[in-house]
Image (cartoon, rainbow, N blue to C red):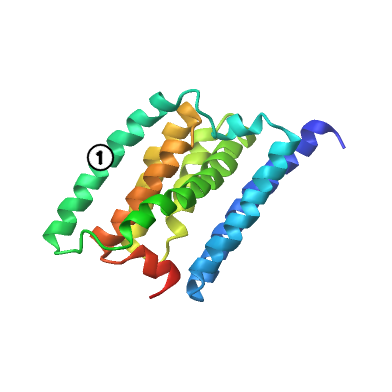
């Protein structure tokens, strides 16, 4: 098979696999198996990353696991994080939310790892691949799909869907500009932790692992 055709097919398969992962998330969530879903997806996709890197080591940088432009890549996500955190803190105080509990430190360490994987799936395998598949209409296709993926997988939590959709709308341009996943994954995890606590009034640890 011609190499460009094979590459095109591989890109489509990655996009479809990301969409299928989102559908599985909804299924597992409806069955109360969110923790199991995270474990299975993490093992599967980390295995895929390692397999592909062994085939082509340049993908590590291409996907966004790089340090070269780390400081510049952190600037705008940091501004967004500070603004988002401030708004959530204001909301939490206004609604008498619990602002801290015994799970916070562990969540602030672990949640970013899950955030990095989510950003990798949507940004590197979703948005970036769509930009390649539709070079003339890339933004028109990739932005709505990326925003939609982040939002829909959090159904039926309305506030969370709006928040993750907004986060995607802000983070996608950052990724396409700097191609760096580290700040996006880090702030994804931290924003998610405090959004659950301060806005939804839920403990994300209990939401995933139970009491």
SS class, disc 1: helix
Neighbour tally class for label 1: few under 14, some 14-19, many 20 plus, Cα within 10 Å: some
Determine the residue positioned at 58% across, 55% down.
42
Determine the residue positioned at 54% across, 33% down.
64
Residue beneath disc 1 = 82
Q: Quadrant of residue 70?
A: top left
Position of residue 99 in the picture relative to residue 148 (left or right): left
Q: Outermost residue toward the left?
A: 94
Say if 52 sits above or below 25 in the image. above
Q: Position of residue 124 (x, y in %)?
A: 56, 39
Q: Position of residue 115 (x, y in %)?
A: 45, 49
Position of residue 7 in the picture relative to residue 145 (left or right): right
Image quarter of the N terminus: top right
Determine the residue positioned at 30% across, 67% down.
202
Say if 147 sits above or below 107 in the image. above
Q: Position of residue 182 (x, y in %)?
A: 46, 37
Residue toward you, 28 or 158: 28
Q: Quadrant of residue 39?
A: bottom right
Say if 187 sits above or below 58 in the image. below
Is any atom of residue 148 visible in this view? no
Residue toward you, 92 or 110: 110
Q: Position of residue 53 (x, y in %)?
A: 69, 37
Residue toward you, 155 or 91: 91
């Amino acid at each position: 098979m011609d190499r460009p055709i094979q590459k095109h097919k591989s890109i489509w398969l990655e996009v479809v696999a990301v969409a299928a992962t989102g559908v599985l998330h909804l299924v597992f969530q409806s069955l109360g198996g969110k923790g199991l879903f995270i474990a299975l997806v993490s093992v599967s996709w980390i295995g895929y990353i390692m397999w592909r890197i062994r085939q082509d080591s340049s993908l590590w940088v291409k996907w966004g696991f790089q340090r070269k432009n780390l400081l510049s890549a952190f600037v705008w996500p940091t501004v967004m994080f500070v603004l988002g955190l401030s708004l959530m803190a204001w909301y939490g105080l206004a609604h008498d939310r619990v602002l801290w509990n015994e799970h916070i430190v562990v969540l602030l360490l672990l949640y970013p790892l899950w955030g990095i994987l989510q950003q990798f799936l949507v940004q590197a395998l979703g948005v970036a691949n769509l930009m390649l598949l539709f070079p003339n209409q890339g933004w028109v296709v990739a932005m709505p799909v990326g925003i939609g993926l982040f939002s829909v997988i959090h159904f039926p939590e309305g506030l969370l869907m709006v928040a993750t959709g907004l986060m995607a709308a802000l983070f996608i341009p950052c990724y396409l500009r700097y191609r760096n996943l580290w700040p996006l994954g880090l702030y994804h995890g931290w924003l998610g932790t405090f959004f659950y606590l301060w806005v939804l009034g839920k403990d994300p640890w209990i939401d995933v692992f139970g009491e």
